[in-house]
Amino acid sequence: MWASGFHLVFGNAIIGLIEGLLLSWLFKCPKRKSILILIAANYASAWAGGFLVAGYLPSLVNITIQNIQSWFLTFVVVAFVVTLLIEFAFFWFARGSREHRFRRTLTANLTVNGISYVLLFGWYWIASGTSMLTQLEVVSVDEIEIPEPYALYYLSYEGDHIIRMDPTKPSSKEAISKVTAHHPNDRLFARPRKDSGFDLFVYLDSDDRGAEMESRILEDFSEQAPVDWSIAEGHADKAEGSWFNFGPVPTIGPASNWFFFTGFWSGEGIDGKNEKTGKKVQYSLELPFAAWHVRNATQIAGDYVVAQLGNDQICMIHPASKRIALIARGKGPIVAKPKQSNPVPGTD
């Protein structure tokens, strides 16, 4: 975020200065004219190209953790081509009336932008969160085996049903209730009962302050379910929407040496620390065209973490082995220990 802001406001002037000097030195163009024109060219391409490549185009494609690597390369190439197209007219004007003007303008455009694009790519790469892209192995959820049974509940992609499934068996999905949950902050959460067990609730957010609501979906649905840390620690009485459901990751299942924490910003992602060995891990994804915050996380047996990545990816992450799997498309997930009297269909 800060890298983009600096680039759009101040960085274009610096890049334009560098490109103007390169154009003057390599292609014998007037220095002052080249600098002024290419500063204007960079502001034009950065704002127009940024809107197109980082804003509009990502909304047209379905980018997930499973295909982010291929889309990353695609957007790098597209961004460079868009820059060349937008800035060609500026290079044409800077070159002036000369022999073989089109060919030489094209050569100057490719050469100068090729050099500056490497610098700009390095700037964004250093500032971005790329560890989910470069360090995590994307595997099929069928390859994951967890030592205890769990039930995953979440809001469907369309926001019209609550789904229950075994988190390692996509074929076990079943709709347990209808709901109208179209706000991106809508989610499921658990609340302890007075005697024992937990009730399942849905939190429905609203753009009108004070119009948020919660509704109980299932009574005594689980023997063990995660409770928001702010409620568990006595800092709050009510649940928050997905946007504010970050921080220490609640644990259900056996005690573990691993403790996890999800950050507010996409670049913070998820942190983990093994209190016994001192090992630390941190994974995040924040790119100009894809920035995914980590929300609604729960740590389960085997030191796996089930969490919502971005707006609608429900993933299982095993930070220690550097693996991640896409479980389902939806939002507001919660993982709980199923009651023996109500096992998840399709499981043993």
Image (cartoon, rainbow, N blue to C red):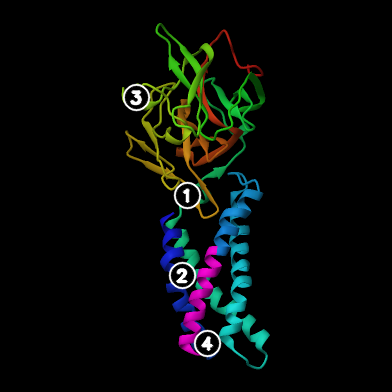
Q: Spatial distance from mark 1 to mark 3, Cα to Cα?
A: 33 Å
Give the quadrant of the N terminus. bottom left
Circle nearer the viewer, 3 or 4: 3
Q: Earlier in the sequence, mark 3 or mark 4?
A: 4
Left/right placement of residue 105 relative to residue 286 reads right
Q: Are marks 2 and 1 in contact (CB under 8 Å)?
A: no
Left/right placement of residue 222 relative to residue 278 reads right
Circle nearer the viewer, 1 or 3: 3
- What's the residue type where badge 4 is placed? Leu
Residue annotated with mark 3:
236
Q: Position of residue 266 (x, y in %)?
A: 45, 45
Q: Position of residue 113 (x, y in %)?
A: 55, 74
Which residue is drawn at the image coordinates 42% and 73% (left, top)? 14
Residue annotated with mark 4:
26
Q: Position of residue 187 (x, y in %)?
A: 52, 28
Left/right placement of residue 211 relative to residue 54 reads left
Q: Main secondary structure of the magenta part?
A: helix
Residue 42 inside the magenta-drawn segment: yes
Q: Spatial distance from mark 2 to mark 4, Cα to Cα?
A: 20 Å
Q: Are marks 3 and 4 in contact (CB under 8 Å)?
A: no
Disc number placed over residue 25 in the picture, else none: none
Return the residue nearer the eye: 256 or 295. Answer: 295
Mark 2 element type: helix
Which segment did they paint magenta? Answer: 30-47
